[in-house]
Amino acid sequence: MTHELLLLRHAKSDWSVEMEDFSRPLKKRGRRAAKEVGRWLHEQHLKPDTILCSPAARTVSTALRVCRQLDLDESAVIYEPRIYEAEALTLLELLKSLGHGHRVLLVGHNPGLENLLLKLVPDPVPLTLNGKCLPTAALAHLSFEGSWTELTQGCAKLITLHRPNSLSGSS
């Protein structure tokens, strides 16, 4: 059976105020980009069955803006503390423990998300001009055969890499 994984890095956060990283909100540009990602997912008919999200403020805000564009209730989001500051291996183990969901959206942070993408996809991933795979608000759409427990290094195919910020000229 084919499964789909959507890896979404949180949108651009606001560094203009001094606060702890976990509580950092989105910038205005980030709020717009998160909405755009949700709209793009809606247009592509990529509504997730399961949404896993870091409980950090910027990821929560990103996920909720995406949900609004997909007509999903906030209760659709599962907040998973292990996603915050997670390494790729932790994210992989978390995904492997899923017992359900054909299409899963994982909303998280770099470098963990980017490293997970690079582990799962055997082919080179296109980079932005500044050398990133997943700049803020980037969404990678992957597919793989088998169950979630069979998710392993090199098993996925990159279907699409959507980067809202790079489309408008910044990354």
Image: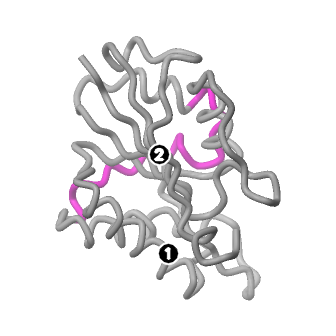
Q: Residue at x 50, y 62 (%)?
A: 59
Q: Residue at x 35, y 65 (%)?
A: 40
Q: Are marks 2 and 1 in contact (CB under 8 Å)?
A: no
In the shown orientation, is residue 95 left or right of residue 58? left
Q: Position of residue 49 (x, y in %)?
A: 22, 43
* Front position in the image: 1 or 125: 125
**Magenta stretch encompasses residue 79:** yes
Specify the amino acid type for callout 2. Answer: Thr
Specify the amino acid type for callout 1. Answer: Ala
Q: Which element is circle 2 on?
A: strand
Q: Which label sits on residue 33?
A: 1
Q: Magenta stretch: give its range.
A: 74-90
Q: Position of residue 92 (x, y in %)?
A: 52, 26
Q: Is residue 150 above or below residue 39?
A: above
**Magenta stretch encompasses residue 47:** no
User: What residue does disc 2 label?
Assistant: 160
Q: Residue at x 39, y 63 (%)?
A: 63
Give neighbour class at mark 2: few <14, some 14-19, many 20+ (Cα, 10 Å). few
Q: Position of residue 37 (x, y in %)?
A: 41, 66
- Res 56 quadrant in image: bottom right
Which callout, 2 or 1, points to the residue nearer the camera? 2
